[in-house]
């Protein structure tokens, strides 16, 4: 038997979540964000599942764009951070690729003729995140310069929202106001909404929405569960018990002996650890599901194993199924125990964990 740890990916849940985005933003086109290997779910499988529901895909590297093309994806692909050097334009000759231009060097590469094949361009404006993007008042100048470049076909504008996950935070309204002021007269297609924008800020929907995390079934809004928001988890991180040990009162468990058995008790060893992407620093009280029932993690998470308290789990024997996160234990809950966000956990599932497609009815 091979190591039982795997990430089971549910394409039907992906499609459900994309349909939810469409339902919430019915007048906008949908750019599905599949960068970072589709947030750890597997780029090609995710793009395949989302194909019919997406108007475009958003990626972070030329390599991701090329691998979508090589796999036969015919939807437009947008390089969300643009190119990192002029040579990258050569790899984009395949057409139906758009690039973001967010700083002067990228604009100058285009003006110098770096793009041989024609392509669409998104002008990125920094409306308040202070990460990537031109100052909004430069929109007209940049638009004009792009219009003078033969290889540039359609020109659009986008911005990224910094605090949309907090529906009470006025930053989003201010960002949208700045974006609107800069672009309203330009007669170009516009995009601002990430998942939180799709869910909580209808005024951000504009011509294109760009959801990521909601597609994968994690909650994009603070204080709301994914289930509440009508989303279905796409990844189940599963493993099983590889051993059950009868310990005595006073036995320390795992590295450093940070947890000591208070009484004679069974301790289960789960075949999953930080080498698989499970977070090493989870708070006391963090749990996994053994045979579908909660079991507390005890002792430190190690590279390949997690030890759990099996008191009250009489039927938990080696081979018993364990859910680390997924349908019955939301990844958002595990992220909270680990002091992080679902994005980091999903993207952090390591290469040694096989991604397995869930077959309908599994
Ligand atoms: C430019 C851009 N648009 C959209 C998204 C999707 O964001 P979310 O996963 O919060 O929906 C991201 C993700 O970081 C992004 O960088």
Image: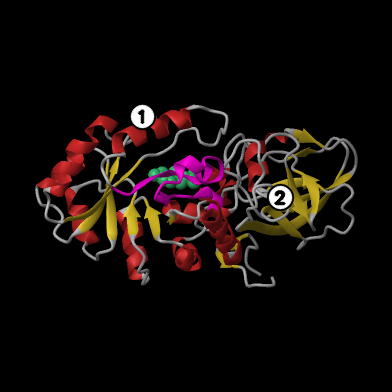
Which one is closest to the eye, mark 1 or mark 2? 1
**Residue 7 x %, y %:** 59, 59
Scheme of colours in the image: secondary structure
The crowd level at tag 1 (other Cα within 10 Å; few <14, some 14-19, many 20+) is: few
Residue 329: mark in rendering: 2
**Quadrant housing the N terminus:** bottom right
- Which quadrant of the frame does ligand 1 lie within? top left
On screen, residue 243 above or below 284: below
On screen, residue 187 above or below 150: above
Quarter-of-image position of residue 128? top left
Residue 130: mark in rendering: 1
Label 1 lies in ligand 1 vicinity (Cβ under 8 Å): no
Q: Secondary structure at mark 2?
A: loop
Along the viewing direction, whichever of 203 and 270 lies nearer the viewer:
203
Mark-to-mark CA distance, 1 and 2 = 35 Å
* Left or right: 177, with 82 as reference point: right
């Amino acid at each position: 038997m091979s190591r039982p740890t795997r990430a089971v990916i549910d394409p039907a849940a992906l499609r459900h979540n994309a349909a939810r985005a469409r339902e919430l933003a019915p007048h906008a086109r949908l750019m599905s964000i599949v960068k970072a290997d589709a947030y750890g779910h597997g780029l090609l499988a995710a793009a395949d599942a989302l194909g019919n529901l997406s108007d475009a895909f958003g990626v972070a590297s030329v390599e991701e764009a090329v691998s979508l093309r090589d796999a036969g994806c015919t939807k437009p692909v947008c390089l969300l951070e643009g190119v990192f050097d002029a040579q990258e334009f050569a790899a984009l000759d395949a057409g139906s690729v758009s690039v973001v231009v967010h700083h002067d060097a990228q604009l100058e590469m285009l003006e110098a003729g770096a793009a041989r094949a024609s392509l669409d361009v998104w002008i990125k404006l920094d409306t308040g995140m202070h990460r990537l993007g031109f100052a909004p008042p430069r929109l007209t100048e940049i638009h004009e310069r792009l219009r003078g470049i033969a290889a540039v076909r359609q020109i659009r504008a986008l911005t990224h929202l910094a605090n949309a996950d907090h529906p009470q935070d006025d930053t989003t309204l201010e960002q949208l106001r700045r974006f609107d002021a800069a672009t309203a007269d330009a007669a170009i297609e516009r995009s601002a909404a990430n998942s939180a924008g799709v869910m909580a800020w209808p005024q951000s929907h504009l011509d294109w929405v760009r959801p990521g995390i909601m597609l994968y079934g994690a909650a994009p809004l603070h204080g709301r569960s994914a289930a509440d928001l009508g989303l279905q988890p796409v990844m189940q991180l599963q493993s099983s018990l590889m051993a059950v040990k009868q310990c005595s009162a006073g036995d320390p468990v795992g590295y450093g002996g940070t947890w000591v058995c208070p009484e004679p008790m069974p301790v289960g060893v789960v075949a999953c650890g930080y080498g698989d992407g499970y977070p090493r620093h989870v708070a006391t009280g963090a749990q996994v599901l053994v045979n579908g029932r909660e079991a507390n993690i005890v002792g430190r998470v190690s590279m390949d194993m997690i030890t759990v308290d099996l008191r009250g789990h009489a039927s938990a024997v080696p081979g018993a199924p364990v859910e680390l996160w997924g349908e019955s234990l939301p990844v958002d809950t595990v992220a909270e125990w680990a002091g992080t966000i679902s994005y980091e956990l999903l993207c952090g599932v390591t290469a040694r964990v096989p991604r397995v497609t869930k077959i309908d009815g599994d």
